Structures are given as structure tokens and as C-alpha cells.
Image (cartoon, grey):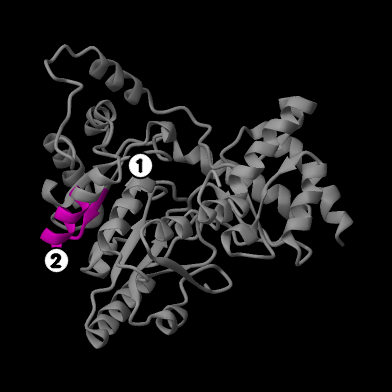
Amino acid sequence: MTIAEHIKTIQAGSSWIRRMFEEGARLKAEHGAEKVFDFSLGNPNLDPPEKFRATLKDALMSSETGYHGYMPNTGYPHVRKAVADFLSKEQQAQVTENEVIMTCGAAGALNVILKAILDPEDEVITPAPFFVEYQYYADNHGGSLKTVKTKPDFNLDIDAVSAAITQKTKAILINSPNNPTGQVYSKESLDELGALLQEKGRKLNRTIYLIADEPYRKIVFDGFKVPSIFKSYSESIIATSYSKDISIPGERIGFLAVNPQAEFKKDLTGGMALTNRILGFVNAPALMQRAIASLQGESVDISEYSRKRDLLCDGLADCGYGFVKPSGAFYLFPRTPSPDDIKFVQALQEELILAVPGSGFGGPGHFRIAFCVADETIINAMPGFKRVMEKFK
């Protein structure tokens, strides 16, 4: 055999998102890009802020000796301090550079965290629908992912989380604003979750961590705010990136931050500094670290995503689709008119519309639309959306 059997198994059921993205490339080559309506991948279509370009240019022009050399595995101290200072305001907690580790995006941060905390057969619980890669991240480090249902509006079901916790539970992994639903979890639900984890941890004599994957934190609409998990639960860790709010996903820059009140904070940060290195990341990209040090709080024009959301929601509502209007991120997760969401997505594909079946996110009977696309893509896809809906009536 050329590759491991386990990897062959994973390949066979690999990400629907990438699969549809690749199918899109084929259809565009066959029909022309302007005739294919690709909503498959959450690839931001807004340009980075002008300040990013200027800051990056300044960083590139530096002639400082050793500018592109190795650094501490946790990242440059001045960058971590800039991140910590901003995070202190955002999370309403006194965060220092010692609680921050710069990482290769949020995916890198999650893998660094899970490598550091998971023992063989430990379980990570996540609410479904969920980002598809989570199951592979847990598996990477000897753990397994256990999913729990959410409420009909995709909010947290605390009773479901409670029922799923066992002696093997090591962490709860949440994503708010959520991919694929766009739901933002309320402060009340996070406080309730924090109280539950504190109670369960005491009964099981085991620390249960709350990990928040927050790359969409700044992409919220209608006055919504993403609450601080640091205020809701002391044993909490944030993983995030600048991929979505600054539109630089290809640059792979993010960070993790440990709650300053975590009981084993020194062990956690030390362990994660090690796992950042031994997983092969070594450290986050030097040039991007220097750039984002001056970009704290910057983002693209979020109102553009809000406008695209409304354009999409109004059009689909007119076509007869049902959905929960997202409060954040740039995804819509409508219900399919047929229980077979894969068959429905295939019907959309016949209209040259690319979306992702909800089954791939643990949300059967739905499909995901990424609306970080040109307005013309949304507008010109509507006749096709309508024709497919009429087929399934």
C-alpha cells in the first residue's frame, strides 16, 4: 500500500466543501466562469484593508539584521503584546503576551491546542452543525469528536451537551459565529455552558476545557456582539485567525489565547509552545506577524457582507426557501425541500449552482451557501434556485 489505510478511509469521505470547489473548477472550464454560480467555499471576496497593504510594504522594506530568522516558538513578544492588549478589551479580561501564542491560522491553533490536551481516546464534544474539519483535528491527536444536537434555530442545547459529557470528555469545541449556520451564541447560553462544565468537572474530578473557534468574531450583523468566553468560564481557550475579517486566508496567520484565570495556565501555554513546534508549524510566519501587530481591530467593510446576506435572503425567500437568518459569518444554511440534501445539491449543480450539502456538516436536510461572492453571482443564480425549488414541490 502506498498510503495508510486510515488516510484512505478519510479520503473516501473527505470534505464536501473541497469536493464541490473542485467540481466548480471543472464546470467553469467547461461552461465559462461567468455561467457558474459558486457558493461552495468560504473564501472572502473583499480585498484586505488598504492599511494591510501599506503595513506589509513597510515590513518588506526593512533591512534589519536577522529579520527573517527564527524567533520564539510562541511568536515575537511585541506582536503577542499587541494581540494581548487588543484581546483584553475584546474579552474584558486582563490578557498578557504570556497567554498568547501566534499560530498558522485558526486551524493551526486548534491542532496545537488539541495536541497539547488530548490523551488517547479522549472525546471532544461539538454542537452540530459543525465545521467538517473538526473530526479530523481530534483524530489527528488520538481523540474523537462527539456531536450533539442544537436547537431548531441552531442555538446551544445545554441539556444535550450535559447528556453527552462522560469521563472521557476533555473539551467542548464551539464556533460562534458559526460555520455553517451563522448563529451567534448568546451570553446567557455561554454562562449556562460555563456553569455546566464547572459542575461536571467537579463531579468527574477532571478539567473540561471550553475551546472557542472565533475566526468570524468581527463579522456580525444587526448590532449583534459575540460575548466573551473568558467571562463565562475560566478553563477556556480561544483559537482564531485574521483570515476572514482582514481577507487574508492564504497567509495563514492567527493565534491562540489561554484564559488568564485557567488553573493550569502555565502547563497549557508551555505544552502548546511545544506542540506548535513539534507539529511542524515551528512558528507563525514572521512577515505576517509583523504586519498584524499594527492591524489590531482592523477589518474589511462588514456592512458589505450584511448587504450580501440580505440580497441572498430576500431572493431565496421569494423562491420559497426556508432558513434562519444568520447573525454573523458569511454563510446561510437553508432547509432543503427534500430530506435528501445530497440529491437536492446535485439538482442545483445541474443549474450550475454550487452549494454544499448539510450532511457534510452534520446537518442533514439543509445546504450551505457561502455568500462571500460577487453580487452578480447571487442575482444571476436566483432563476436557477427557483427552478430547482419548483422541481421539488
Secondary structure under tag 2 reads loop
* Residue 226 higher or lower than 33, as above or below: below
Q: Position of residue 13 (x, y in %)?
A: 61, 55
Q: Position of residue 142 (x, y in %)?
A: 37, 63
* Residue 351 higher or lower than 327, as above or below: above
Dot 2 crowding, Cα within 10 Å, few <14, some 14–19, many 20+: few
Q: Residue at x 22, y 33 (%)?
A: 293
Query: Relative to residue 88, is residue 365 drawn left or right?
Result: right
Name the quadrant containing residue 186. bottom left
Along the viewing direction, whichever of 229 and 201 lies nearer the viewer? 201
Residue 174 seen: yes
Specify which label sits upstream in the sequence, 1 or 2.
Answer: 1
Quarter of the picture holding the C terminus:
bottom right
Dot 1 crowding, Cα within 10 Å, few <14, some 14–19, many 20+: many
Real-space Cα separation, disc 1 to disc 2, in angstroms: 24 Å
Query: Relative to residue 31, is residue 249 drawn left or right?
Result: left
Residue for badge 2? 264
Query: Relative to residue 310, is residue 50 drawn left or right?
Result: left
Q: Position of residue 204 (x, y in %)?
A: 26, 85
Magenta residues (range): 256-273
Q: What amino acid is labelled 1 in the image?
A: Gly
Name the quadrant containing residue 205. bottom left
Residue 39 seen: no
